[in-house]
Amino acid sequence: MRSTMQQYPLNISQIVRYASTFHSSSETVTWTGETTRRRTYGEVGARAAQLANGLRSLGISGDDRVGTFMWNNNEHLEAYAAIPSMGAVLHTLNIRLFPEQLVYIANHAEDQAVIIDGSLIPLFAPQLPQMKTVKHVIVNGEGDRSLLAGHAAIHDYDELLAAQSADFDFEAASAGVDETDAAAICYTSGTTGNPKGVAYSHRSIYLHSMYVLTPMAFGINASDKILAVVPMFHAMAWGLPYAALFSGASMHMPDRFLQPEPLAAFIEREKPTVGGAVPTVWNAMLAYLDSQNPPPKVDSLRDVAIGGSACPPALMTGLEERHGIRVLHAWGMTETSPLGSVARPPAGLGPEETLAYRLTQGLLPCAVEGRIVDDSGTVLPNDGKAVGELEVRGPWIAGAYIENPNMPDPDAQKDKFRDGWLRTGDVAMISPDGYITLTDRAKDVIKSGGEWISSVDLENAIMGHPKVAEAAVIGIPDPRWDERPLAAVVPVAGEEVTFEELREYLSDKVAKWQLPENWVIVPEVPKTSVGKFDKKVLRQKHADGELQVTTF
Amino acid sequence: MRSTMQQYPLNISQIVRYASTFHSSSETVTWTGETTRRRTYGEVGARAAQLANGLRSLGISGDDRVGTFMWNNNEHLEAYAAIPSMGAVLHTLNIRLFPEQLVYIANHAEDQAVIIDGSLIPLFAPQLPQMKTVKHVIVNGEGDRSLLAGHAAIHDYDELLAAQSADFDFEAASAGVDETDAAAICYTSGTTGNPKGVAYSHRSIYLHSMYVLTPMAFGINASDKILAVVPMFHAMAWGLPYAALFSGASMHMPDRFLQPEPLAAFIEREKPTVGGAVPTVWNAMLAYLDSQNPPPKVDSLRDVAIGGSACPPALMTGLEERHGIRVLHAWGMTETSPLGSVARPPAGLGPEETLAYRLTQGLLPCAVEGRIVDDSGTVLPNDGKAVGELEVRGPWIAGAYIENPNMPDPDAQKDKFRDGWLRTGDVAMISPDGYITLTDRAKDVIKSGGEWISSVDLENAIMGHPKVAEAAVIGIPDPRWDERPLAAVVPVAGEEVTFEELREYLSDKVAKWQLPENWVIVPEVPKTSVGKFDKKVLRQKHADGELQVTTF
């Protein structure tokens, strides 16, 4: 039996219409390091219309991809509003990618135009000549535009908008757009092979926005002020921009002023209520706040989400107990739009139990089905003990990566999707009440004699030693156990540390059979373009015999 | 460009799976007047599977309609969980309909089976012989089953379930169900013509549930306890049951104990946090609470939604100031799933302005587009002054009424849908910031010399007089002004009131040109089956010359 409900496709243009009409006095606020640049959502709506007209005047039509290479700022939000609403596809280029990756993704997505911040011209300009499809570069703000000359038409963002009408029929432009058509695309900074692209749909973004607003996630309403430190060029800033427009909450964006001092000044001045950032940002912030007397007042922040990697307990308790900022652990990835779970504890527990829940990666919501699976593909129980690779499915989970027939990548979908589930590459436990706890990345877990050893747990244990600055643990081939751990250690500058000392230190912290027998001192741990440990490089160095390993 | 997101249809079976696994210890609690009957969501999941198997054993397949004729209780929630999840369609029969309407809707929906509460057998049994498609009646709880004999197979609810396995593959049963297929149907108790049916889809219920959870609506999370006083046979209990399962919040249901005393005892004992009911229930509750010394403690209720008709300010302030219950005004109708808006005021206003916002019918959310339209179909501005018929559209708004070719109703869709919009029949203003204020029903508004007079405003003004128990105002034909108001007044028992006295009383409360010149005393105002003023009957009486009107 057919329902009698209206056929009303979910579309981002509706979100923009809503924000710019009924929440026309809500604001988007950009920090300049000393003061703010402010626009109302009414103005954002008008400027989004001007931007859409401007892009049409440059020949952008249909589902053309329009890139952004920008910090978090008002104009980036305007691009978020305008581009999908006009039927085109927003491609947020990650400014932290290696140059060759940046070129690859612009070509792979076939970006026709790119909007860039003037301050980022030096990063962007050298790659422009290799971006084959980019016909127009639109520059927002000050910067040396001569660096861009000769490879595309160069436009000034404000001038482009000023020449245009503030009327654009977004509803008509969206009429031919199916809700499952692409609205925005985002590439991961994978450490293996080429970057992989995900195309979010209008539908997936709409549904994800609603989840972001619910109390099980961030609990946002129109009176909230969202501080989006997490970059808008990285996994859609965790969905905060569209959730803000959907609810009428104001957006507060730090532009390039991500250092603790200007960021704290921004918070103290604007009093945001909800925020999101990766642990490194909050880590630096905590150190800065602790160093000030009196510390800047940042306790307007009711909830700050931390995701991207695990939040150390000391960071969570430090921010909360000394500075009044409650931390919410969140889990997700580019392929999950990105919010997969948020660690709000159940009500009514004591402080210790509550903290234990808060240190998990969070409760899976109704719309994100999760399961853990062992090497043979068997689904394991959600008993809080079994450990397997986390697989998820749901309306805002990727089912494939973007393919471009002109740039075929035979490995594009390899090992990432199975029977309609996304294989996250994360190794996890799921508790009976739906909280997930990540223990490792699947490719990093050490498979020793049929048991899995978490490389992350070993690293954290080793890094607990006062003389250790960093430590990475990889699995290396072992004739008897298949794999055994190798610990690569970076001592604190000026310190010397012996392997015997470290083994002794670990002896009461990890099970005996997990204790690494292979050790090496390295000057630094190799990092990916976004600052994560790059264990692939370490494994390669070991395979090439470049590491001087001591074995016990 | 196609997105790369998973094709994951929204389906109620996912909501039930989620509640019964990751929130397996949340509860559904039914009041017996003195104690509670409790089941965990884990048990609800198992019993829903048993119910689905039981219905299959009775031959229910495909999109067969299964009716419920029940109070709000655990078993009704099990029916909500099982029936749409097995691919069948839940039809909640309104126990307050007139007998002939009840027969009409069971035949129109072609219900194959009906689950009824034993306590409702006397209401249901006389109509059963005329329900042509009903082959099975399943009785929940005690009651005289002999009254049902001879017209369908009669089953005991608990026995039916006990004979079945607690395994049912809801995922497989949902595989062939499109998200826009019907999940549940509900008929309005229209005062004109036959009842009209709306078929909600899996998609519309899923999206509506997410909205219910957001802070702009009820802000519900897993630790909440929802008190659903609003009947599950009326507009899906405002979506609370599915929102509860979606979030893991517990459900608290009063069964047939809707009188203030047992209801207050239930609240005092179970401490629900969020509730919903129509004004009459809260009105009686306020009077009861005020009469007790000390009054029962009901302030566990953080928010109670009041909808169905406007909440008198005295009720709102009385519940809040004397009993610690904050009232949320909500607007909607069967055709809007039913939640269309909730009156949460903007933050940061003074008490008077806040109250003014709270007395509106609420803020339209992103997903419910609204506009007001005049008689000629022209869209009026959202300036908080212009008054017109409210039209809405969105993913959980009806686009048509159910049609049954075997029971054709040529007027089924008449005047209710226009260009993809639902004509609500409500007359409203919309403020620039998206709050709607209803002033009347479109069919009741009095059109006098090109201006609209709100019958509701006049009634409220007249009912403010201490000697008036009830008053209804209708428009009657007038050769000069098209229509003029006629006030039908029911005096307080034992009181006499003169029309001169009432006109004098109104003189500083309404504009002079709105002052009724036509008056009549009536013994009572005619009511619909659900207790609303039935002005159609009054208009008919006037047309038939049955009213002795005094004209000034």
Image (cartoon, coloured by chain):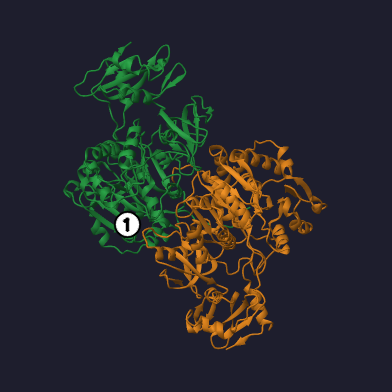
Chain colours: A orange, B green
Picture quarter containing residue B6?
bottom right
Along the viewing direction, whichever of B251 and A438 lies nearer the viewer: A438
- Residue at 33% x, 52% y: name it: B251
Label 1: element kind = strand
Position of A197 with respect to A214 (left or right) is right
Which residue is labeled 1 in the image?
Answer: B27
Circle 1: is it few (<14), some (14-19), or many (20+) Cα within 10 Å? many
**Pointer 1 chain:** B
User: Is residue A40 at least partly visible in the picture?
Assistant: yes
In the picture shown, does residue B482 fall above or below A139?
above
> Is residue B3 among what the camera can see?
no
Please provide percent x and percent y for residue B419: 52, 34
* Number of numbered discs overlaid on the protein picture: 1
- Give the image location of residue A347, x and y in percent: 38, 58
For the view shown, which residue lies furthest in the right direction?
A150
Q: Nearer the viewer, residue B418 or A502?
A: A502
Q: Residue at x 65, y 36 (%)?
A: A167
Q: Position of residue A280 (x, y in %)?
A: 59, 63
Determine whether, in the image, residue B265 is placed left or right of residue A75: left
**B523 left or right of B41?**
left
Determine whether A326 is above or below A484 in the image.
above
Position of the C terminus of chain B by quadrant = top left
Could you tell me residue B304's position as x and y percent? 35, 43
Kind of residue indicated by mark 1: Glu
Pick the residue in front: B233 or A513. A513
Quarter location, residue B93: top left
